[in-house]
Amino acid sequence: MHCPAICLLLLLAGCAVDAPKDSSSAGALATGTWKGELRWSSTIAVGDATDGRTAVVFANCDGEPRFYWRDTASDAWSGSASKWKTVRLESSYLLYFAAKSEGVGWVETQSLALVEGPNRSLAASWSRSVDNRGVPERDMDRRFVQSAIGHLSYDSAKCSGF
């Protein structure tokens, strides 16, 4: 074997990175609630807009992370009952789920990337995709995606209400 081939193999071996391990809880993320406002955009109108700002709450209670956003059209809180899976790397977290209704119907995925900052703050990036298979192909609400970014502040170690 020639020196360039050996050097290349050593270089490539040094670049290997362990794959993140999936965990069922939010790991070292504190128990409690974070609140903030995210800038969002959508491929379909929510109310009369395809972008804007919305209040959000992230709750990590009893090892069960949950994410809620205030519906800008109805002013009600929305979220998912699905169980989020969590991957943790240092102070960064990736939470995600994929869910499907029974039969031909709703298929949804969501992901939430969080990075811990000073004073338990979180930088957040959220995305959602929906395929509403019970709606005709030509309907604008059949398939849509939404995303949002912003910062959350640690609010409370208590989880009441969430």
Image: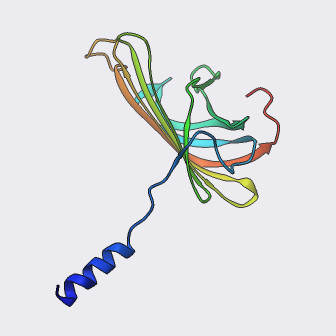
Q: Is 157 situated left or right of 37 in this image?
A: right
- What is the x, y in percent for residue 114? 58, 49
Q: Quadrant of residue 140?
A: top left
Instruction: Name the residue nearer the viewer: 43 or 31.
Output: 31
Vertical placement of 105 versus 40: above or below?
above
| Image quadrant containing the C terminus | top right
Vertical placement of 53 versus 2: above or below?
above
Instruction: Name the residue nearer the viewer: 71 or 31.
Output: 31
- What is the x, y in percent for residue 16? 39, 68
- In the picture as drawn, the residue positioned furthest to the bottom comes out as 3
Q: Quadrant of residue 13?
A: bottom left
| Image quadrant containing the N terminus | bottom left
At x 69%, y 51%, the residue is: 28
Instruction: Name the residue nearer the viewer: 148 or 99.
Output: 99
- What is the x, y in percent for residue 40? 51, 39
Residue 42 in view of the camera: no
Q: Is 158 situated left or right of 131 in this image?
A: right
- What is the x, y in percent for residue 79? 59, 26
At x 42%, y 11%, the residue is: 102
User: Number of labelled discs?
Assistant: 0
Vertical placement of 162 versus 93: above or below?
above
Q: Is 153 situated left or right of 123 in this image?
A: right
Indicate how the structure is coloured in the image: rainbow
- In the picture as drawn, the residue positioned furthest to the front comes out as 1
Residue 83 in view of the camera: yes
At x 29%, y 12%, the residue is: 136
Vertical placement of 5 versus 130: above or below?
below
